Image: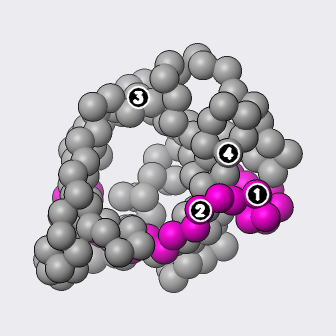
Amino acid sequence: MIEIERKFLVLSDSFVAEAFSKKRIVQAYISSNPDRTVRIRIKGDKGYITIKGKGNHSGTTRLEWEREIGLLDAETLLTICESGIIEKVRHEVKVGQHVFEVDIFSGENEGLVMAEIELEDENEPFEKPNWLGQEVTNDERYYNAYLSKNPYKKW
């Protein structure tokens, strides 16, 4: 239930040709409180509920609990979420021994492209592809819960 993740901005769209998976994601928050977020997500044709705890000092590690729920349930729960929908297309790209999830945001966050990598340990080494840019792991402006309230287009 512990998630160790690092986030990066993306420099170019060259990752698209390397992607082995591509899915549309729509999500919103029942609670965007940074101490405990509760997210409803539709990814492709599946629904999910996710609860995340507050990150550690570096922002890389936090508790995450996620369960698949029915698509109709997810669609219904989205109607009672806080305002601010996150829309993006997620591309999964294998680089070395890891998979990067690269999100191309749309809607109010259009123009933002961000990559995440999940690790077993905060200090685990990983291969950095040439399209990977600045690390933003500890910058709360790039958390989806923040983006739902403060869209990238308005920065």
> Which amino acid type is marked by label 1?
Glu
Q: Secondary structure at mark 4?
A: strand
For label 4, the residue is: 94
Location of residue 18 by image quarter: bottom right
Give the percent coordinates (x, y) of residue 84.
34, 75
State which mark lies toward you, 3 or 1. Answer: 1
Which of the labelled discs sits on residue 86, or is there none?
none
For label 3, the residue is: 61
How many neighbours does mark 3 have within 10 angstroms: few (below 14), some (14-19), or many (20 or more)?
many
Give the percent coordinates (x, y) of residue 1.
27, 31
Q: Nearer the viewer, residue 78 or 93?
A: 93
Q: Secondary structure at mark 3?
A: strand
Q: Secondary structure at mark 2?
A: strand
Q: Is residue 82 left or right of residue 141?
A: left
Visual colour scheme: one colour
Q: Residue at x 25, y 48 (%)?
A: 66
Question: Where are the magenta residues, as a range?
Answer: 8-33
Mark closer to the chain start, 2 or 3: 2
Are dots 1 and 4 in contact, CB under 8 Å? yes
Q: Nearer the viewer, residue 71 or 65?
A: 71
